[in-house]
Image: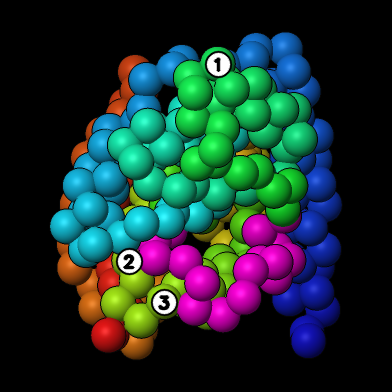
Amino acid sequence: MTDDARELADDVQELAEAQRQHWQNTYTTHPGMYGEKPSSPAVHAALVFRAAGAKDVLELGAGHGRDSLYFAREGFTAQATDFRPVGLKQLRRAAQEQGVAARLSTVVHDVRDPLSLPDASVDAAFAHMLLCMALSTKDVQALAAEVRRVLRPGGTLVYTVRHTGDAHYGAGTAHGDDIYEHGGFAVHFFPRHLVDSLADGWTLNQVHAFEEGDLPRRLWGVTQSLPQ
């Protein structure tokens, strides 16, 4: 590894740790900050998963779990993972209140680590704006490989990411690897070639451009599936 590459890796690692604490504090201070309604990508994903015959869904970066709760209410068995225990605690409480606790489980997990799931054990995976957090390209590629490992043949991945056409791309503090920190939040803005590379060996079913929020944030919604 070159000195520049080592410096970049150390910076991204330090940034990721800072972001972990930032998000933990944010969810503690503002429980349920995104509301109770599911995100529009989760509603779309549920339709895709049902059409594919999926029964169980893994959500990566669930936060306080509005989307995992939606999947459970829609009849899927959902496993929610996040590196923030406080959000998952809120999720378990909400699952009890909504009567879906039997269809929903939670696991504290850092996506830079391997998933604690057997090979080919999940029908579908979902991640809304997780891959574009403070993760290096190498981290993102490793995560995509882990998702591929745990999905069954024909399994489907739906994810969303902010891209390099976003208004905040290039703004704030640059951390390299298309990662910029603005207002305390670090984002890895995806170029299109990164989306294509993550679909290598998959069928890339859809890359849909959409906007979300007041800025608005500009995202891609990506749907890809494994061969049967």
In the image, 226 versus 92, the foreground residue is: 92
Residue 151 horizontal side relative to residue 12, left or right: left
Q: How is the image coloured?
A: rainbow
Q: Find residue 188 and report its horizontal and vertical position in percent.
A: 53, 52
Placement of 19 over or under 184, stated as above or below: below
Task: Tell which circle, 1 or 2, labels the residue nearer the N-terminal end.
Answer: 1
Amino acid type at circle 2 is Thr
Residue sitting at x 50%, y 41%: 103
Check disc 3 and report the residue beneath it: 152
Check disc 2 and report the residue beneath it: 156
Mark 2 or 3: in front is 3
Q: Quadrant of residue 75?
A: top left
Check disc 1 and report the residue beneath it: 97
Q: Quadrant of residue 215?
A: top left
The magenta-colored residue range is: 110-125
Mark 3 or 1: in front is 1
Placement of 183 over or under 166, stated as above or below: above
Amino acid type at circle 3 is Arg
Q: Find residue 4 and report its horizontal and vertical position in percent.
A: 76, 74
Say few, some or many: other residues with alpha carbon within 10 Å of mark 1 (under 14 / 14 to 19 / 20 or more): few
Residue sitting at x 78%, y 84%: 2
Q: Assign a secondary structure to mark 3.
A: strand
Q: Find residue 12 and report its horizontal and vertical position in percent.
A: 73, 57
In the image, 86 versus 18, the foreground residue is: 86
Mark 1 or 2: in front is 1
